[in-house]
Image (tube, rainbow, N blue to C red):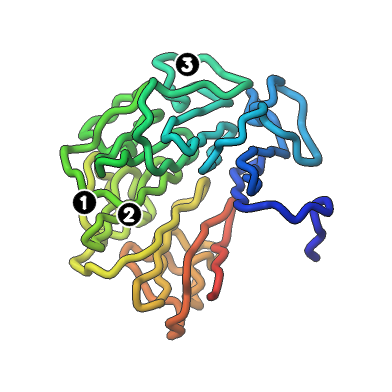
Amino acid sequence: SPIQVGALTDWKTLVCGSQHCGALKTNGTIWMWGRNLNGAMGDGTSTTHRSSPVQIGALTTWAQLSLGESFTTALTNAGALWAWGLNTDGQLGQENITHRSSPVQIGSLTNWRQVSSGSNSSAAIKTDGTLWTWGNNAFGGLGDGTTIHRSSPVQVGSMTNWKKVVAGDGACLAIKTDGTLWAWGRGSSGQLGDGTTTSKSSPVQIGTLTNWKDISLSLNLAYGGAVKTDGTLWTWGQNTNGQLADGTVISKSSPVQVGTLNYWRNIASGKPRGAITYIE
């Protein structure tokens, strides 16, 4: 059953990776807890696990946090992009594969708007609407038309109308400002939602609809989901444990509606199984 973490009432945002969690407070500080492989906590240690929240550094300007598989990325209010933790595939964006137990800035730019970390890669959108990715690229999950790993951000195409991106297990989903839904990367279980089980190394549009609002991908299993502007909930991909919530255990390679309710607000896919949804 739910238990309260401490007694403070100034928490703002909570995110969880596969083995660690993090949160932002209203004062702009970052706090982490959980398993600390390869410095995923960012507290200067590499193997010390934390069973209660610890503050990361002394900055009070953190605005956004995303957790991958044993690594973390974050944005400041000024639009600077930072990362720490596991770096075997260049997922920290440092042009190397050196693990980091404390936050390090990715480049020097301050025009980053949104970031998402998957199993071993990340994706981010700049304020100019361009899309950038880095890290593991075994299945074309970086969307740059190759399967070459990247240890620093590379631009995906030349479009400037990307609105939101989420990274998962070797794949990405994204929504453009026109409400269209796009996917790329590993597609072996239909997790791209394009009606196939084929991997794609460049973004492909999912259907023709223009009313997609929120998206999510699992970190460790091949399924995803989305909410439309009309409040309906849709899922697709691997369904061996019923994680698509469509009443079956049959995998789907295209979006299927979950029930008939039309007041879903957002969606979050967990690890290792199941989708968590929130009703407004």
Q: Residue at x 62, y 53 (%)?
A: 12
Badge 3 element = loop
Residue 253 position in % (x across, y down): 33, 62
The residue that label 1 is drawn on is 204
Q: Position of residue 139 (x, y in %)?
A: 33, 37
* Crowdedness near tag 1: few (<14), some (14–19) or many (≥20) residues, C-alpha within 10 Å: some
239 vs 12, left or right, is left
Q: Earlier in the sequence, mark 1 or mark 2?
A: 2
Circle nearer the N terminus (3, 2): 3
Is 8 displayed left or right of 133 in the figure? right
Tag 2: amino acid: Leu
The mark found on residue 276 in the picture is none
Say above or below: 244 vs 73: below
Q: Closer to us: mark 3 or mark 2? A: 3
Q: Which residue is mark 3?
A: 97
Of the residues shown, which amino acid type is indicated by label 1?
Val
Q: Which mark is residue 192?
A: 2
Image vertical order of residue 229 relative to residue 61, above or below: below
Tag 3: amino acid: Ile
Q: Alpha-carbon distance for marks 3 and 2?
A: 28 Å
In the image, taking residue 87 as reference, residue 256 lies left or right, namely left
Q: What kind of element bears circle 2?
A: loop
Q: Secondary structure at mark 1?
A: strand
Q: Residue at x 25, y 55 (%)?
A: 176
* C-alpha span from label 1 to label 2: 9 Å
Q: Nearer the viewer, residue 246 or 143?
A: 143
- Residue at the spot 30% in from the left edge and 25% down from the top edge: 148
Q: How many marks?
A: 3
- Residue 242's place in the image compared with 111, above or below, is below
User: In the image as oriented, which residue stretches furthest toward the left?
Assistant: 158
